[in-house]
Structures are given as structure tokens and as C-alpha cells.
Image (spheres, rainbow, N blue to C red):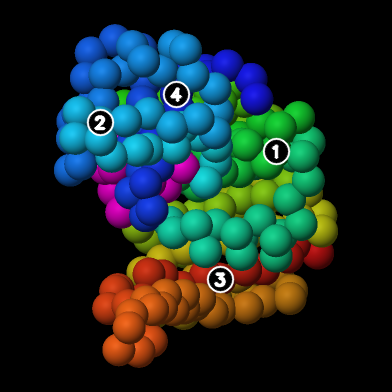
Amino acid sequence: MPEIKLPAVLVDGKNSFLVNSFEGELHTHKGVVKLEELRQKRYGDTVETHKGYKFKILPFTPSDFFKHFRRSATPIMPKDIGAIIAMTGLRPDSLVLDAGTGSGMLAAYIAYFNAYGEVVTVEKRADFARVARENFKLAGLKNIHQIVGDINEVAEGFKKEFDLIVLDMKDDHIFIPKAKELLKTGSYLVVYNPYIEPSKKAYETMKKEGFVELECFELLKNDYEFKRVGTRPVTRVWHTGFIVVGRKT
């Protein structure tokens, strides 16, 4: 296995800790790890805490984005991101517009799977944009272009058509006509919203604008725990958001 490059993660069961330095100490619920010991390790090796507990050393990958990115606004969940990528047929050489960067979760995943393309992400709040910028740096993503501003104003300066546009922002329906102008024919617009009323408004607006293959749905992920006494669902938040998808003709 190759030598460790930072960032990396230390994993024990369901627990995962981000490591971004070979100096100092990492304090965990199972003891302290001296980070300098990682210099002599390889991926797949273990490192022990001062209490004798062992953590596996693994590379930092996109599966770790959701666990270790800093949070500002509530991020889109991986299950919803996966649906967006699959249902819009994202290619690895696409030009994507992400309106409403938030913590940068969606932009990061799309940028990773869009390795030969570009993601333009627009965020109105400068404090959210700063958090997202740190997350993009952590992930080593070079194909994301950040803009701080109001998408309704910023979009007037775009000269190219996009292969995919995703809206995760307030009053999303207002931008839908402009989004249609900015999309290539046959490409998709996705609107993500935690509430059904604005999702319905987005659906109706997209229908009025002539989008086809329209869908509005939510995805539920049920996690289970296995104990000696039996198996049951883990108590978690069930609803995350509604997704509206439509295709420009």
C-alpha cells in the first residue's frame, strides 16, 4: 500500500477521525493518538492510542466528505446527491451550475465525479462561502469556481450554456425561467427544497416553462441496528428534502 498522504482518516467501527497533520496529538473517546507515528505507516495499518485501542488508517475519499466537511447551512444528504447525479446522467466533462453553495457538499461531490468538467457554485452569504471554500481545499478539488453573490444578478454575466443546474435556495421558482435559458437542450434542472409547498411551486413553474420528464419525490433511508435482542430501525431524522427534476426540450 502507498505511504499515507494527508488528509487521512482513522476508523474504528462507526467512528471516523480526520487527520490533517503529522504533528501533535489526536484526542479520541478511546485515548490519544500521537500523529507523528503515522509517518511510518501505510494505508491499512493500525495506530494505537495510549489506552491500547487500535484505529485503521484509511485514505480520505468522497465517502468522507459528508462526515468531515465543516457545516454552515444544512447540507444535502448523500442519498439525495446520488439520486441527482444518477437521474441527470452527469458526465465527467460537464459544466454545472450549483446555486446555493451552503457548506459545499453538493458542489464537492459533483466536482469529484465531474473530473474533466467544471462546477460554478454561487452563494449569497459570504460566511457560508468561506466554509465551503475550506471544504473544497480539504478535498483537493480544483475544478470548482466560487462566486459570492445573488444568483439572480450573477447569472446575467454567464456566457455559456450548462449541462446541469441545481437550485438549493429560497424563492427557487423565481430563477427557473432564467435557468431554462442557461441550460443546453436535453439537459436537466434540479430543485431541492425541504418543504413541499415551494417544491410544488417549482414543479408547476417548470411545467409552465415546458420542462419534460418532470418528477417530484423524496428518498427515505432506513438504517437498522442488530442487537442480541433483535433487529430494529435506528431512530433518525427520516425526511431531508424534496427533489424536483425536469428536462429542457
- The magenta span reads 64-74
Q: Is residue 223 left or right of residue 114?
A: left
Asked whether disc 3 touches disc 1, contact meaning CB atoms under 8 Å apart, the reply is: no
Q: Label 4, label 2: how many angstroms apart (C-alpha)? A: 19 Å
Asked whether disc 1 touches disc 2, contact meaning CB atoms under 8 Å apart, the reply is: no
Residue 113 magenta:
no
Q: Is residue 246 left or right of residue 136?
A: right
Which residue position holds label 2?
Answer: 49
Name the quarter where the C terminus is drawn: bottom right
Q: For numbered disc 4, what is the local secondary structure?
A: loop
Residue at 37 percent of width and 38 percent of height: 55
Asked whether disc 3 touches disc 4, contact meaning CB atoms under 8 Å apart, the reply is: no
Q: Identify residue type, mark 4.
A: Pro
Q: Indicate which label's residue lies in the foreground, 3 or 4.
A: 4
Residue at 17 percent of width and 43 percent of height: 29
Q: Specify the quadrant of the image occupied by residue 228.
A: bottom left
Mark number, residue 114: 1
Which residue position holds label 3?
Answer: 244
Q: Indicate which label's residue lies in the foreground, 4 or 2.
A: 2
Q: Identify residue type, mark 2.
A: Thr
Which residue position holds label 4?
Answer: 7
Q: Label 4, label 1: how many angstroms apart (C-alpha)? A: 21 Å
Give residue 235's position: percent from left, percent from top. Answer: 27, 78
Q: Is residue 175 visible?
A: no
Q: Identify residue type, mark 3.
A: Val
